[in-house]
């Protein structure tokens, strides 16, 4: 039966894709991929490109990065309907997403619209926080430790609670809210326990201690903060 | 330079290993692997076995699953010293671990002992919770949602706080403490929002709604609970 595959391509290095993701992509008829600025291939597409077959049809679609929910939903709806049509016509169809397909991914909105109309399979990918821990050979958690994953765009109370109640905290999208997070950690004497990794596993990867960061500086978009209270970086 | 590789082999299906993990394993001289009961290969070793080269030396070592910390530390120390010796003799050496190498893994204790004496590289793997979300094609988190990961062996207050303060909670090792977690969720009318997945991506995988579980029943060892407050299973 023709199937729609949601495929996590991992954090950046094409070798960090799973064997299953690679084999699935090689056998696809149609691949939907986000369209970057200037109609360029997205980061996810560049990661997966080494595994595209010669007969693969790539359909780049724009996923608007706007605050207007109605505008986003209209675009997801249109793309989801295209996918359903392609699968119902007998095509093996994929959608690629950076990192893990189940972590803050547009793929989830498409799935929600598609529902049970066609066969769907989700392929997990290495998440950015998993790769960050690997990059610095430091555990995310050990023993009975807790890990909280929170976007830095959450409200201040949620961020403060996450910091206070956990041994380890991953803050995604830290570039969107660095001054607030910096102030919360400075107040708690935790600057030495936090590291920021940008573009993990990509050629432009950089790692910097939070204590050495100017909190007003502009970080790369794909930056994540790792806080480990039991560990000084 | 000869290197020690800590390799996450993912949750169970050999195809859920990364290309990088597979290529690294194929090029190893020596592989350290946990020894299961009756000196059988561990689950991690069975997952990686399709990629072993003919000349690979496998060194199965016992990692005692006991409460006595001194006994565990003595065994980690001895194994870590063996690894250092093998790498210093010029061998490419690996250690395999189920799921992600940075998530509740014995590998982290070895790393701690080995320190900076030899070159070390950690390879991320698909975690069990990532695979669980993929298996049921349901997001771990969306928008500004939070995710907490906690072992069910944590104390009751920590578990209750995790449930109360988060949108999504992953409880690892749920088989060790099901009655308590069941009672906490029942009291909060959250039984319908929790699912237990056992042996994710293995042949023996099973998925069951918490509301349909007898809280006194013995679950498989590799069982994880996923709580999603915004979602009824």
Image (cartoon, coloured by chain):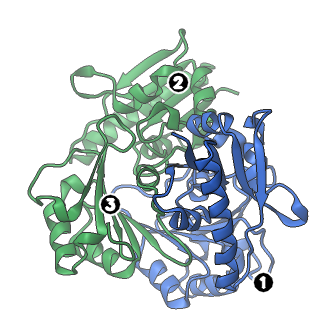
Chain colours: A blue, B green
Q: Residue at x 55, y 45 (%)?
A: A3
- Across and down, in percent, residue A104 comes to 57, 67
Q: Secondary structure at mark 1?
A: loop
Q: Quadrant of residue A39?
A: bottom right
- Across and down, in percent, residue A168 comes to 47, 67
Residue A55 lies left or right of residue B134; in this view the side is right
Residues at marks 2 and 3 on the same chain: no
In the figure, B53 relative to A216: above or below?
Answer: above
Spatial CA span between label 2 and label 3? 31 Å
Q: Secondary structure at mark 3?
A: loop
Residues at marks 2 and 1 on the same chain: no
Disc 3: which residue: A144
Which chain letter matches label 1? A
Q: Quadrant of residue B93?
A: top right
Disc 2: which residue: B85
Residue A152 lies left or right of residue A30; in this view the side is left
Q: Quadrant of residue A213?
A: bottom right
Which chain letter matches label 2? B
Return the mark for residue A216. Answer: 1
Spatial CA span between label 2 and label 1? 47 Å
In the figure, A211 relative to A24: above or below?
Answer: below
Residue A152 lies left or right of residue B219; in this view the side is right
Return the mark for residue A57. Answer: none
């Amino acid at each position: 039966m023709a199937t729609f595959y949601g495929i996590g391509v991992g954090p950046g290095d094409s070798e960090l894709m799973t064997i299953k993701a690679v084999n699935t992509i090689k056998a696809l008829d149609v691949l939907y991929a986000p369209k970057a600025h200037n109609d360029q291939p997205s980061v996810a597409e560049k990661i997966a490109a080494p595994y595209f077959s010669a007969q693969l049809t790539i359909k780049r679609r724009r996923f608007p990065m706007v605050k207007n929910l109605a505008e986003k939903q209209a675009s997801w709806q249109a793309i989801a309907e295209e996918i359903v049509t392609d699968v119902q016509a007998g095509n093996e169809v994929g959608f690629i997403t950076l990192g893990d397909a189940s972590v803050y991914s547009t793929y989830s909105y498409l799935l929600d619209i598609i529902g049970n109309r066609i066969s769907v399979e989700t392929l997990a990918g290495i998440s950015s926080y998993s790769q960050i821990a690997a990059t610095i050979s430091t555990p995310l958690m050990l023993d009975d430790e807790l890990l909280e994953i929170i976007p830095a765009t959450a409200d201040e109370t949620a961020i403060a609670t996450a910091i206070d109640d956990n041994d380890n905290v991953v803050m995604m999208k830290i570039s969107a809210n660095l001054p607030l997070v910096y102030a919360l950690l400075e107040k708690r004497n935790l600057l030495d326990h936090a590291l920021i990794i940008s573009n993990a596993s990509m050629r432009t990867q950089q790692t910097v201690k939070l204590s050495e960061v100017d909190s007003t500086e502009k970080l790369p978009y794909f930056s994540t903060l790792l806080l480990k209270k039991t560990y000084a970086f």
